Image: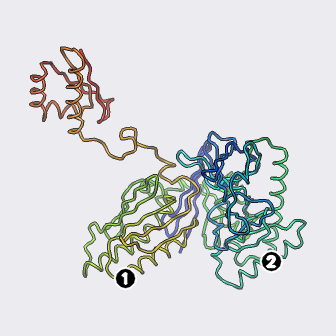
Amino acid sequence: MSEEILINVTPRETRVAVVENGMLQELHIERGWRRGIVGNIYKGRVQRVMPGMQAAFVEIGHDRAAFLHANDILRPNATPALDDGLEPDSAATTTAPVAAGNGHTPSITELLREGQEIVVQVVKDPIGTKGARLTTQISIPSRYLVLLPQSRVVGVSSRIEDELERQRLKTLVAAHNLDAPAPRGYIVRTNAEGQPDEALAEDIAYLERAWALVERNVAQARVGARVYEDLTLPMRAVRDLLRREVDKVKVDSRETCDKLRSFAAQYMPELAEKIEHYGGARPVFDLYGVEDEIQRALEKEVPLKSGGYLVIDQTEAMTTIDVNTGSFLGQRNLEETVYRTNLEAAQAVARQLRLRNLGGIVIIDFIDMSDPEHRRQVLRTLEKSLTKDHAKTTVYDFSPLGLVEMTRKRTVESLQRQLSEPCHECGGRGMLKTAETVTYEVFREITRAVRQFEAATLMVIASPKVVARITDEESAAVAELEEFLGKSIRFTADEQYTQEQFDVVLL
């Protein structure tokens, strides 16, 4: 399997595309005026403590106060719990709920007070109307490790499956901890598999320097100040995505390419040669049709090669995905047709979740299958396809209604919400009232206006489509209405009016 990383840099926008076998799999966007804040560390102040929600709002220098739940607060003299199944590669930060020794989370009023100054880290960007999500369990990532400065636990990513390798890595990190003046907690990332002791030692030294800088900044900073900022998108892409399996990293900016090479030479010298400057005449994203794929990723329907298709609906509460056979008729029988369509759909769903960066609750409505073995195979295909996803995913079995429920960790806005805004004409409904519906609304408004006010003539201003329908198909109804009201009614078309807009003017 070939894999390439394409980096497109412009003065106000940077985009990173992950292409596997010529197909776009992931897209990351960072704009100068709206950089993501996940991974940033702030010196904050507690604005309001809400016992009913077991949470607090914290001022971190942004327009909206950030949200901090009691489960995300590190208690003094408590050892953070570390789930060995955490996926530290999915984001810059990794959090674990901290509870009392008996498993009981204390009240938020015992942990925080209003006006208290605390050091917090962002684990989720502001999404929609919600502020950023915070934690007090600080974590700083490097190439091979994630530093947990308030912990003493050493864990290993669950994606490293070889037990001997897991033990080797754990032993090496623990040995460095013994020699350190202040032992720290670490999570060994997937990228560390097969790495020598020297590489881990360099990462530990880098993380110690970074944490020392954070501590100095905290001591000097005012409330609301940022004391640590995560790397820029190109550097994060190299840190998190560049592996031995990647063939090339193509960068269309010479300046950015030089910075990435220097960064790679310092932290991953064996992979630095994979980074190259792209100076071709065609834009780098046009090499694999990435721009066209981005446009298709904003549409509701996703065609399948077999002739079937997916319908993806993103709502506030969840994302729903419907699978349809479409024009695929199959060659044997209905059950086989349905089974093959669902297998292809499972692979397509996994890709679309990564590409569109869909998170939260996802409900997949596969076509009904009567054979239990077919269901198991479809579920297995979905789970296998999701193993390439850097975000943590959890898939549940088919429900009694034949639906597959799953969750995907969400840290930033979806691709659609990054690149689009609600339609001004329909208010985000995705639907418009028909010209017929608006016509009858106009008639009702005319009747209401005549009964309420005195006027000899009325003028209706509406969109050309609505006026065309009124003066053509509904002309008889207009004549009847004029006779019934005893008033003259004129109609004027205005291009500035949307299909649902109209005004009734009394003359």
Question: Residue 112's spot in the image, x, y percent?
Answer: 73, 50
Question: Residue 380's spot in the image, x, y percent?
Answer: 46, 78
Task: State whether residue 299 is above or below residue 62.
Answer: below
Question: Residue 171's spot in the image, x, y percent?
Answer: 79, 79
Residue pictured at 73% horizontal, 47% vertical:
113
Q: How many marks?
A: 2
Q: Earlier in the sequence, mark 1 or mark 2?
A: 2
Residue pictured at 73% horizontal, 54% vertical:
111
Q: Nearer the viewer, residue 98 or 425?
A: 98
Q: Residues within 10 Å of mark 2 (few under 14, many from 20)?
A: some
Residue 172: mark in rendering: 2
- Classify mark 2: helix, strand or loop: helix
Residue assigned mark 1: 372
Q: CA distance from mark 1 to mark 2?
A: 46 Å
* Amino acid of disc 2: Leu
- Classify mark 1: helix, strand or loop: helix
